Amino acid sequence: MLWAKPGSGKTAIALTAVDDMLPDKVLIVGTKRIIQHVWAAEAKQWEHLQHCTFAWLQSTPKQRLKVLQDSDATYLLINYELLPWLADELAGSPWPFDAVIFDELSKMKTPGAKRVKKLRKPIQQVPVRIGLTGTPRGNSMLGLWSQALMTSGPVLGRTFTEFRSRWFYPVDVERRIWKPLAHTEEGLTAEVKPYAYAMPLEEATPEARINLISVTLPKQARDAYTDLMTEHKAEIEGQEVKALFDGVMRNKLLQITSGAVYTNEDEYVVSHTAKIDALADLVEELEGEQAVIFFRYRHELERIREAFPDCCTIDELDEWLEQKHQLIAVHPASAAHGLNMHVGGCCTAIWMTLPDSQELWEQGNRRLARKGQKNQVVSHVIAAVGTVEDTVSRQLRDHGTKQNELIEGVSTNG
């Protein structure tokens, strides 16, 4: 496992290391957009990798099978969603790869996921397995087991149940929520250390500077927020909003602070425009410079595009990279891993509502704070102070601190 901050050159490092083996066939696994936009483009930027040839396992099963069997390309690219298909196709046969590279290994962190279950045995046939990630820990160390399994074998325990029972304890009767034991952070760091190389944090690319833009909820929104928190129901623009359970409550409170609340799966009622107004002021200050806007809820995308009709989406990424649009609005899960969005000098990220996932927060900021970035990256966070958004921000800081401690603990490999 190679742990390094997003944007620190993991793609080129992995390609160089594997290409030195003079392999016949290598499988590269990544998200669809990374497979489409990053790997072949990265190879073209380096003289010693110009000869690398790539083919994409995509489209229909018949077309994918033809590429798998007949392509002369050394590097075969496949997105994570198609890994179960590949495992079924190769079932009973030796895997024909000299190496496998998992781009953003944390995509394999869930032991119960179909892709992990399908690969846990056949992947062990491949002699060289490399996993790249800048967020090995995310919000919990529970995800380390299957990441290690994909790259290094059952080094953290033969089964996930064995691993979990050794390092964690359940805090609910249903045994759904597990917390680390007192010795887990230190002990598991030492346990995983022989199987990971962590690039020391001081060698990573500079961090984005965080700029908090505070907004105040208008009285109607603040009253609705208070009513929902105390009475489990509130009225917004004549529409009743309910939250009977804590998980629903938290999400509805975040929706109120974001600017609109869903009354059903598709319909929402606007609670305020304070964040859109703050965004408009910020865009005016940019004076035409490009920016990436990260949203959490679908209604935010709709309202952003209503306010800025020329704002494009991730489907128009190529046009944005060609600087045909000033603004691009993306969900962090759609652009979290590997995309080089700093092309053209963009150095401004704007978060409309923070994610709960430390991985999405870290990866989102690293779309711009990458090697080759010549400007100071600034991430503007538009947040309603004195609300649940304060809690989300604090949790992200705590998870980030723990992840840095894990990486620093392993980076003494030398």
Image: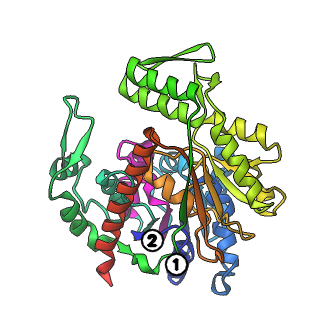
Image x and y of residue 67, in percent? 66, 58
The structure residue drawn at horizontal position 51% and vertical position 75%, both measured from the top left corner, is: 14
Q: Residues within 10 Å of mark 2 (few under 14, many from 20)?
A: many
Image x and y of residue 9, in percent? 55, 75
The structure residue drawn at horizontal position 50% and vertical position 82%, both measured from the top left corner, is: 21
Q: Which residue is mark 2?
A: 4
Q: For this view, does 6 lie left or right of residue 138?
A: right
- Amino acid under disc 1: Ile
Q: Which residue is mark 1?
A: 13
Disc 1 secondary structure class: helix
The structure residue drawn at horizontal position 25% and vertical position 63%, both measured from the top left corner, is: 155
Closest to the observer, 379 or 67: 379
Image x and y of residue 204, in percent? 48, 76
The relative height of residue 76 versus residue 63 in the rendered view (above or below) is below
The answer to whether the residues at label 2 and label 1 have Cβ atoms under 8 Å apart is yes
The relative height of residue 391 versus residue 36 in the rendered view (above or below) is above
Residue 92 in view here: no
- Amino acid under disc 2: Ala
Q: Which residues are magenta?
A: 98-125
The relative height of residue 244 versus residue 142 in the rendered view (above or below) is above
Q: Residues within 10 Å of mark 1 (few under 14, many from 20)?
A: few
Rendered-image quadrant of the N terminus: bottom left
